[in-house]
Image (cartoon, rainbow, N blue to C red):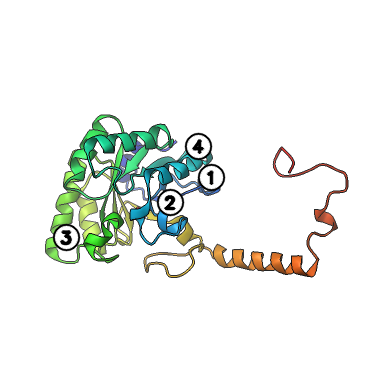
Amino acid sequence: MTTVMDLQRFKAERRRFAMLTAYDYPTARMAEEAGIPVLLVGDSLGNVVLGYPTTVFVTLEDVLHHARAVARGASSALLVGDLPFMSYQPSLERAITSAGRLVQEGGMHAVKLEGAGPSLEVVRRLTQIGIPVMAHLGLTPQSVHALGGFRVQARTEEAAERLLQDACELEAAGAFSLVLEAVPAEVAERVTAALRIPTIGIGAGPHCDGQVLVAHDLLGLTRGRTPRFVKRYADLGDQAVEAMRAFAREVAEGTFPGPEHSYRGDAGGRGDGGG
Ligand code: KIV
């Protein structure tokens, strides 16, 4: 089983690793088969599977619901649950309760939260009580309204310096890894070189210790535009539409179900239980 210590070791050994989002049981099982070492039940589930325009609508109950499904499908990956907007910002007590629920009820091994500044105390306390924390800097979607939209961050020298400073403070507070989202590759390279903990990039160039993608983007299941940094490794969305179209056509034509899909008194069904 992958642990937070393994990620530190990967960095020390200069071994790059992949993290993938997962929001459900089948994706967790497939990611395990593929040997993905870290699964993130990201609050991106708000955009990706719940249809919200931003992640600020996602609740702790939403993440818990998906976390439990992922935990049932995964047995060896390190499972990281995102703390959604307003589940850790109001108070330290709220943050501890929310993180504790992700571990105790959601089956997560670690939590992720966004930003530095006020989040530092949260990172410190969660780490002290034994809940590992993955930090997240750069484009932090929970602050989309303050950032003025989904745009590349740390583009000036001053902003890059601030990000580096924040990263060092998060490491000192106890974060075991750091997601860098939508920052110039040179900035991610500087941060990666300065930290002992691994950086995990998304839209942050090739120099991070790990890379993360949203599963639906990688699989081509996202309908509509995806960010420039996404690489589509498959076109399952188009294949799904084709399959659904074929099903509808065959039903209309009366060619499905054919004799091979109809019972003739013999049992046999899905899984173990028939049906
Ligand atoms: O919520 C999420 O999926 C994330 C990743 C994109 C890093 O935060």
Give amino acid for label 4.
Ser
Q: Is residue 57 above or below residue 233?
A: above
Q: Residue furthest right?
A: 265
Give the structural element (helix, strand or loop) at label 1.
helix
**Residue on which the image places disc 1:** 25
User: Is there a contact, CB below 8 Å, between mark 4 and mark 2?
Assistant: no
First-in-chain label (3 vs 2): 2
Q: Which of marks 3 and 1 is nearer the N terminus?
A: 1
Give the CA distance from mark 4 to mark 2.
15 Å
Residue underneath mark 4: 75
Label 3 neighbourhood size at 10 Å, few (<14), some (14-19), many (20+)? many
Q: Whole-Å distance between the Cαs marked 3 and 4?
A: 38 Å
Asked if ligand 1 lies within 8 A of label 2, the reply is: yes
Label 3 and label 1: CA atoms lie apart by 38 Å
Above or below, 70 relative to 148: above
Q: Which amino acid does label 1 sit on?
A: Tyr
Q: Which of 64 and 111 is in front in this view?
A: 64
- Name the residue beneath numbered marker 3: 160
Q: Position of residue 104 (x, y in %)?
A: 40, 31
Q: How far apart are marks 3 and 2 (CA)?
A: 27 Å
Q: Nearest the camera: 233 or 141?
A: 141
